[in-house]
Image: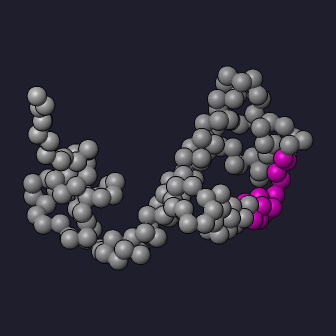
Amino acid sequence: MRRTVAKKKATPSSMWYGPDRPKFLGPYSGDTPAYLTGEYPGDYGWDTAGFSADPETFAAYREAELMHARWAMLGALGCITPELLSTYGGVDFKEPVWFKAGSQVLTEGGLDYLGNPGLVHAQSIIAIVITQVILMGAVEGYRVNGGPAGEGLDKNYP
């Protein structure tokens, strides 16, 4: 004899998504806009400026937010790497603290990346700005034009 088991009612896999997700003012939130369905992370039903009302604009904002977050994570890594290398790696920096390192460009000797004058020796802030604009422009141009994801794939998750 074969037994059948009744299926459980479908529930969302996380409490943070769906119509029953926590709202920005908790029980005092009232009705949320119809376009905020709880599908995306951080959707707490609050959009007073209406930034998410147009799906195309929302997609563009979402893509920009993801890219900025990724660059910020790389920046955070760049802040702690010199301090870790000087403390544990034996690399001698003039100034390993991230908020003081940039001022070395304006000093007499300039800035040596990774403590090595043969690697990159920066003495001009204008040259640094031009180099960073060219490098960032090339990377962003590559990403916008398909990049490593190729054609027809989600450009937010290459």
Residue reaching furthest right?
Answer: 118
Give the prevailing secondary structure in the magenta stretch: helix
> Quick check: 131 left or right of 101?
right
Q: Is residue 147 magenta?
A: no
Q: Position of residue 123 (x, y in %)?
A: 83, 53
Q: Is residue 124 magenta?
A: yes
Residue 143 appears anywhere in the view: no
Vertically, is 143 above or below 81?
A: below
Residue 127 appears anywhere in the view: yes
Q: Residue at x 10, y 28 (%)?
A: 1
Q: Residue at x 57, y 55 (%)?
A: 158
- Choose between 29 and 4: the one closer to the eye: 4
- Choose between 135 and 91: the one closer to the eye: 135
Quarter of the rendering containing residue 129: bottom right
> Quick check: 32 left or right of 101?
left
- Choose between 131 and 147: the one closer to the eye: 147
Quarter of the rendering containing residue 48: bottom left
Q: Position of residue 135 (x, y in %)?
A: 74, 61
Vertically, is 68 above or below 80?
A: below
Range drawn in magenta:
120-134
